[in-house]
Image (cartoon, helix red, strand yellow):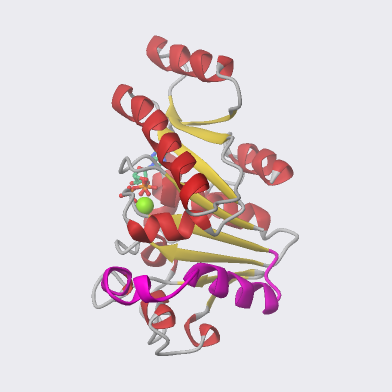
């Protein structure tokens, strides 16, 4: 099962939700996170200097190294292929070599399944370039992550329409009915209104994650949320998503 978290809008919580969901899934399955964002946020979150290997996802896609050479263990049952923000070549590869390869991500995902991973969880960039289109066309599930604020809310429809175009033109065969509305503050009237509108929207399964200092603090400490704040109110939401994917 290959899951990608996405939205062209930046800063809505894609990387945070990638880490939280992957950790939840790793409780009873073998999971790998793929950092497919040149900003390298998920990689920085978990990898201290001594854990950083020589190679990243750009080297794998460029065929400089075998997939196995770029995998780093983060926790029990949970690995990552990082993306180096400085010196990484993912973006460059996507703008040059990628066009010469048919279905580059299908091949990568197949290899990772052969290596025994049950779940591949991909973090993506806040954009919709040829790179994201190739990634999305190869996954099983695309979870939209949106912030509880007006412009982000409006961006959901635009993201969904790009996904429909990928489904048609690139033979995408994914579910995209799940949406995480992040940083909700239930005491804000506007947020309640957004939740209500999304609940009423046909074809959307809504998951709500509230504003929580612990989500940001855990990242500063290079920890997962369940390690930093095991009773956090929003942890069960990841378990709910885990149940339906
Ligand atoms: N529910 C939340 N409560 C409080 N802070 C949050 C929450 N979700 C995310 N954050 C914080 O918001 C910031 C942006 O989150 P994150 O990096 O996950 O967004 P992103 O969508 O991946 O951004 P980008 O588009 O740049 O990749 C981070 O500092 C993160 O710690
Ligand atoms: Mg991110």
Above-or-below relation of 84 to 17: below
Check the image and name the residue furthest to the front: 169
Residue at 61% in and 78% down:
111
How many numbered callouts?
Answer: 0
Above-or-below relation of 106 to 137: below
Above-or-below relation of 117 to 164: below
149 or 230: nearer the viewer:
149
Residue at 31% in and 54% down:
129
Q: Position of residue 226 (x, y in %)?
A: 58, 50
Q: Quadrant of residue 106?
A: bottom right
Residue at 52% in and 53% down:
4
Q: Is residue 208 left or right of residue 27?
A: left
Residue at 38% in and 82% down:
62
Answer whether residue 203 is magenta in the image.
no
| Residue 121 seen by the camera | yes
Q: Position of residue 213 (x, y in %)?
A: 41, 38
- The rendered magenta stretch, by its main secondary structure, is classed as helix
Q: Position of residue 152 (x, y in %)?
A: 34, 30
| Residue 41 seen by the camera | no
> Quadrant location of the N terminus?
bottom right
Above-or-below relation of 33 to 184: below
242 or 199: nearer the viewer:
199
Tell me the magenta residue range. Answer: 91-118
Q: Is residue 41 left or right of residue 22?
A: left
């Amino acid at each position: 099962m290959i899951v990608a978290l996405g939205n062209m809008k930046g800063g809505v919580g894609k990387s945070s939700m990638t880490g939280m969901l992957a950790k939840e899934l790793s409780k009873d399955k073998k999971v790998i996170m793929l950092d497919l964002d040149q900003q390298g946020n998920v990689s920085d979150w978990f990898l201290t200097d001594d854990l950083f290997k020589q190679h990243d996802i750009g080297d794998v896609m460029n065929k400089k190294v075998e997939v196995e050479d770029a995998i780093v263990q983060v926790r029990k049952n949970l690995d990552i292929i990082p993306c180096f923000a400085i010196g990484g070549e993912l973006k460059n590869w996507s703008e040059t070599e990628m066009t010469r390869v048919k279905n580059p991500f299908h091949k990568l995902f197949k290899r990772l399944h052969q290596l025994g991973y049950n779940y591949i969880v991909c973090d993506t960039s806040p954009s919709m370039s040829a790179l994201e289109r190739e990634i999305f066309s190869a996954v099983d599930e695309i979870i939209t992550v949106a912030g509880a604020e007006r412009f982000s809310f409006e961006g959901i429809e635009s993201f969904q329409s790009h996904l429909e175009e990928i489904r048609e033109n690139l033979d995408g065969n994914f579910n995209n009915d799940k949406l995480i509305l992040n940083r909700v503050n239930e005491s804000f009237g506007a947020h309640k209104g957004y939740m209500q509108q999304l609940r009423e929207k046909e074809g959307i399964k809504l998951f709500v994650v509230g504003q929580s200092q612990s989500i940001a603090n855990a990242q500063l400490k290079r920890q997962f949320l369940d390690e930093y704040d095991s009773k956090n109110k929003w942890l069960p939401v990841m378990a709910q998503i885990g149940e339906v994917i």
